[in-house]
Image (tube, helix red, strand yellow):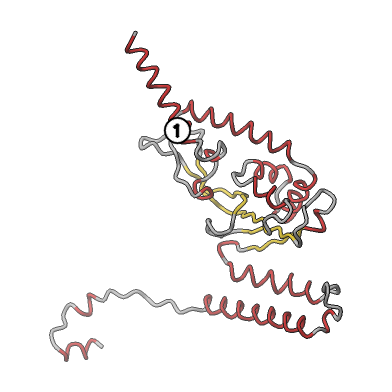
Amino acid sequence: TESKHRRRGGDLKTRSTELASAATVSPLTAVLPASTTGKKSIVLSNETRKELFKQAKVTKEERRAQIDERYKYLISRLADGIGLSEQQVEKAVISDDKFQFIEQFFAPAGIKKLLFFYQNVLQQKLNTSLRSDGSTKSLLQKKLFITMGSTEDFTGTCAFFLRISDKVVTVSNVSQEVNFGIIDCTNGNILEGLEFFLSQIMIPALKSQQNWGTVKEGLKNSQIQDFLYSVDKFVGILSSSRQNIEDKIQLTKVDIDVYVSNLQNPSDCITAG
């Protein structure tokens, strides 16, 4: 009986340790790819996984209840821009570990930008049995997730929301206070994506802009003209850089040992040269 109590105590302690280590992230982290969370995968027991999935389900429902017209506005813009259904976008948003960034974006004097990446990431299949080494299968799948933009490699599409003031973002002003845009950098072609976004979208929009705030002269103002010239020049630099990279000369790798192994004196060096 004493040994049984000890074993039970040990089992409870082991499970508590597993849950504690898993809870250092969020309940949703266990179902996210390691590449988007920046943390190493944690091998968990089936019982612990069930507990985490249960917690994750509760968290998702709480977040779903939090969605108002502001969230729906963002979701509809993302769905239209990326080509997903609103249901798919909502599911991705409420499952994201960085969900709280959205509320921080809406807050008065909150964060100025909200970024989403939509690209291929390695995702673990947690519903499959563990391999002999304790690992799980990983598949490359497209995923929409919130990001700071500095922790993951950018290889797909970036959808972004920008605030235009420090006002609190409300249901009534979200469409006026928040700008939306997309940069398509499929296969990691960041220069090409940025060049297209600036030259085909931003510059035409700026040149047709009538209201420049406190600048009454608008496009006739010398500072506005200098600004537009600088943007044009920057796009030209991007284009030149992209072309230089695409047209680069790839030198063939040479096995140097073949040429230097028989060099005995200076004349051999001259002959090899």
**Residue at horizontal 72%, vertical 42%?**
87
**Residue at horizontal 43%, vertical 22%?**
12
Residue closest to the far left: 264
Callout 1 crowding tier (Cα within 10 Å): few <14, some 14–19, many ≥20: some
The image shows residue 85 at horizontal and vertical percentages of 73, 46
**Residue at horizontal 68%, vertical 50%?**
104
The image shows residue 59 at horizontal and vertical percentages of 63, 34
Q: In what quadrant of the picture does the N terminus appear?
A: top left
Q: Is residue 51 above or below residue 190?
A: above
The image shows residue 209 at horizontal and vertical percentages of 83, 73
The image shows residue 146 at horizontal and vertical percentages of 62, 51
Mark 1 residue element: loop
**Residue at horizontal 61%, vertical 80%?**
237
Q: Is residue 224 above or below residue 89?
A: below
Q: Which of the 4 image quarters holds residue 196?
A: bottom right
| Pick the front one: 52 or 250 | 52
Q: In what quadrant of the picture does the C terminus appear?
A: bottom left
Q: Is residue 165 above or below residue 49?
A: below
Determine whether, in the image, residue 177 is placed left or right of residue 273.
right
Q: Which of the 4 image quarters holds residue 223?
A: bottom right
Q: Which of the 4 image quarters holds residue 155?
A: bottom right
Amino acid bearing label 1: Leu
Residue closest to the far top: 1
| Pick the front one: 71 or 222 | 222
For mark 1, what is the residue? 44
Circle count: 1
